[in-house]
Image: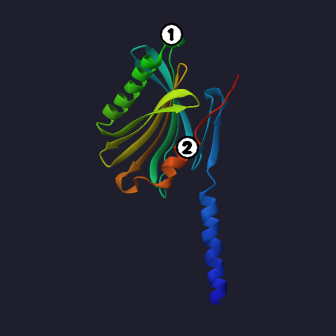
Amino acid sequence: MKNAIFLMTVFLLSFSAVNAQNWEKYKAEDLAFVAYYPNTPERTVQKVSTAVGELDMHMIMYSPTSGDDNAVYSVIRSDYPEEQFKDADEDYNATVLDGAVNGAVSNVQGKLVYDNVVKFNGYPGRSFKVSMQGGFIYINAYLVENSMFITQVICLTDKDKNDSIERFLNSFELIKTK
């Protein structure tokens, strides 16, 4: 009897571990990316006023209601006018990415924990962490020609550095749609 209970417990734990690893692939060909989410995300579009005019901000977000280490998993894409990047150099791209970092920090009245300059598939980017009241935001921002891609995970303070943060951020991939 003890062996049967032990085997059943091992089976259930194994099933739970495998089941927990089955994140959903979200492929948005029109937005040119793939990412894996813990569950089905919702897709919305908002008009955002910027210094270069009104932009569409496409958000693909999953907000768990319970049982998850994180409060939000999201990918955001905004397309800037092509002419804004016609003669863009590394300094200009860095300035645009600085704006993304500074905007994220000020939007939540947070503090920048770290900010790393990165390359993603040859494109300029930033990987940074913001502390805010009650938690942290992990963000990767990539400037792909005239499009800004932002992947982010928001976690509560006591769930900082959990494995799902990197799992989500590392699942993001650009796809070719042409």
> What is the basis of the colouring in this image?
rainbow
Secondary structure, mark 1, is loop
Residue 174 seen? yes
Labelled disc at residue 170: 2
Is residue 5 toward the left or the right of residue 137 in the image? Answer: right
Provide residue 44's location: percent of width, then percent of height: 53, 32
Task: Give me the residue at 33% from left, 43% from top.
Answer: 131
Q: CA distance from mark 1 to mark 2?
A: 30 Å
Residue 58 visible (yes or no): no
Task: Mark 1: give few (<14), some (14-19) or many (20+) Cα within 10 Å.
Answer: few
The location of residue 119, given as percent across then percent down, is: 52, 31
Residue located at (62% from left, 89% from top)? 2
Tell me: 67 left or right of 4.
Answer: left
Figure label count? 2
Number of other residues with Cα within 10 Å of mark 2, as a class: few under 14, some 14 to 19, many 20 or more: few
Q: Amino acid at mark 1?
A: Asp
Q: Secondary structure at mark 2?
A: helix
Name the residue tied to disc 1. Answer: 87
Q: Seen in the image, is 177 located left or right of residue 42?
A: right
Amino acid at pointer 2:
Asn
> Which picture quadrant has residue 122?
top right
Which image quarter is the N terminus in? bottom right
In the depicted structure, whether residue 69 falls above or below residue 116: below
| Residue 162 pos. (x, y %) | 46, 54
Residue 136 at what x, y percent from top left? 37, 46
- Tell me, for residue 8, which label it has, or none: none
105 left or right, relative to 57: left
Please name the residue shown 50% across and 10% down the image. 87
